[in-house]
Amino acid sequence: MRVVAKMASSLPVLYIPHGGGPCFFMNPPPGPPGTWTAMEAFLRLLPTLVGIVPRALLVVTAHWEESVCSVQGAERPGMLYDYYGFPDYTYELKYEAPGEPQLAERVKELLTGAGIQARIDPNRGFDHGTFVPLMVSFPRADLPVVQLSLRSDLDPAAHIAIGRALQPLRKEGVLIIGSGSSYHNLGLFFSQRGNKDAKLFDDWLTETVSQNNTERRNEGLVNWARAPGARSAHPREEHLLPLHVCAGAAGPDQGSRCHHESLLGKAISAYRFG
């Protein structure tokens, strides 16, 4: 039986893939049979990986960018179906978890206290970077959920600093989840091109995240674009940067790979800190 997180407990930080659109809720799922099976199984086991029940979830989503860090502040967030060309029934999916305005204010407080501009958005709904994986991992929707945007300048060092400011939340019962994908090149995803680069980047990313020297780890992540296969794996880095927030929030805690698969030939991994 899992134990609910207490104030003294330091929760881990997770960087996870969220799949392709509403893939886990399609019949049949897109792609060849079994394409999304391993990822879905990993997401279902996420509460077990955490080990204790968090008080709330803070999701850093790859699908929200603002010039200033923005925090979802609605008490009852609506749904934002920010995907295109999927069956009609996928636009009727519901994830009815409550928001938590007090947590939104706390996130803003921590960010501004660290000299990072932040604002609360009272109208933002759950985008698919949040509701799709949480419908698999936390299907009861009984934990408060707050989303945090990326900053639209996509500065890797700035996103590590954002995460660093949020470290205290880990001892306040809040599970920080970075939702993106360690590989995100839709132009190559359904072909064999880029498979080698995907593996090269995944190997580099895993080695970098797993370093026991926090300064070297974060320096590597800041300079991620110099890594082997980097721009093939991420022509644009919005799906990678939630990992930078996670690394910042991890503080000195070492990262480790907690999931790995070959998805249509592309290496994809998830990471846990702490």
Image (cartoon, rainbow, N blue to C red):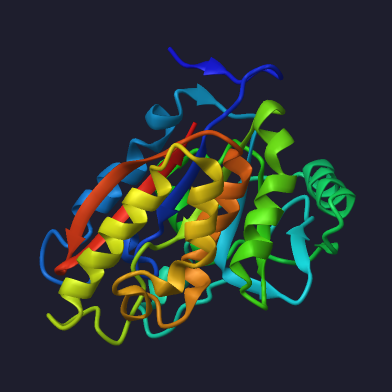
Name the foreground residue: 90 vs 244. Answer: 244
Relative height, residue 260 to residue 122 (above, below): above
Q: Give percent across and percent down for residue 208.
A: 39, 51
Q: Can residue 99 be seen?
A: no
Relative height, residue 62 to residue 259 (above, below): below
Q: Residue at x 73, y 52 (%)?
A: 76
Q: Give percent across and percent down for residue 11.
A: 57, 29
Q: Give percent across and percent down for residue 35.
A: 17, 62
Q: Residue at x 78, y 42 (%)?
A: 103
Query: Position of 110 compared to 211: left or right?
Result: right
Of the 4 image quadrants, the one containing the N terminus is: top left
Relative height, residue 155 to residue 173 (above, below): below
The quarter of the displayed image where residue 44 is located? top left
Name the foreground residue: 25 vs 204. Answer: 204
Relative height, residue 155 to residue 171 (above, below): below
Q: Can residue 249 be seen?
A: yes
Query: Position of 52 compared to 182: left or right?
Result: right
